[in-house]
Image (spheres, rainbow, N blue to C red):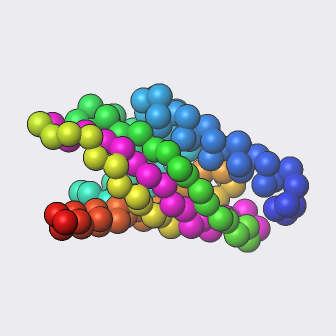
Amino acid sequence: MDSTGTERANFDEMIQDYLEAFNAGDYRRVASHWAEDAVHLPPMGPEVRGRAALEEFYRQSSEVMNAQISDHSYECRFAGDHVFVRESWTVTFQPPGAGTISRPGKGLWVGRKEADGVWRTFWALARLDEPEPASAPS
């Protein structure tokens, strides 16, 4: 696999499309980036299994939190038809009855190139970093 050329460019486009879909609230498109048998361990809540469940998870999360991802960066390692990804981001969300919150997060995930030639995530683990402690008044 040419991980430095065309294949890497295709993978980068997939990542960008995922982020654009997430921030636009297009959860059908977000879910299309997951394998049918995907398993996701989100930062809050129980594991989510399967593409349809992931679409519903993202839709419900958006309705409650109105999350947006920014400052996304990642590194990846290709191994045949698999890719291993370590990423970081900032997520901004607004829980009901609260102000806007921004928290950095990190994730590890494994993707595979499926029979249709598309890279999709099949295992993912995400976490949010603890908020910075409030500074003491001077």
Q: Residue at x 52, y 33 (%)?
A: 21
Residue furthest to the left in view is 97
Quarter occupied by the N terminus: bottom right
In the rendering, at what x and y percent does residue 59 appear?
Answer: 33, 34
Would residue 89 be counted in the magenta stretch?
yes
The residue under the point 48% across, 55% down is 89
Residue 135, position as x, y percentages in the image: 23, 65
Residue 56 is situated, as x and y percent measured from the top left of the image, at: 33, 38
Percent coordinates x, y for residue 85 in the rendering: 60, 65
7 relative to 67, above or below: below
Quarter of the view holding residue 84: bottom right
Q: Nearer the viewer, residue 79 or 73?
A: 73
> Relative to the observer, which residue lies in front, 103 or 59?
103
Q: Is residue 110 left or right of residue 77?
A: left
Closer-to-camera residue (83/88): 88
Residue 87 sits inside the magenta stretch: yes
What span is colored magenta in the figure? 80-96
Q: Main secondary structure of the magenta part?
A: strand
Identified at 41% across, 39% down, the residue is: 68
Residue 101 visible: yes
- Compared across the picture, whether 111 is left or right of 61 comes to right
Residue found farthest to the front: 138
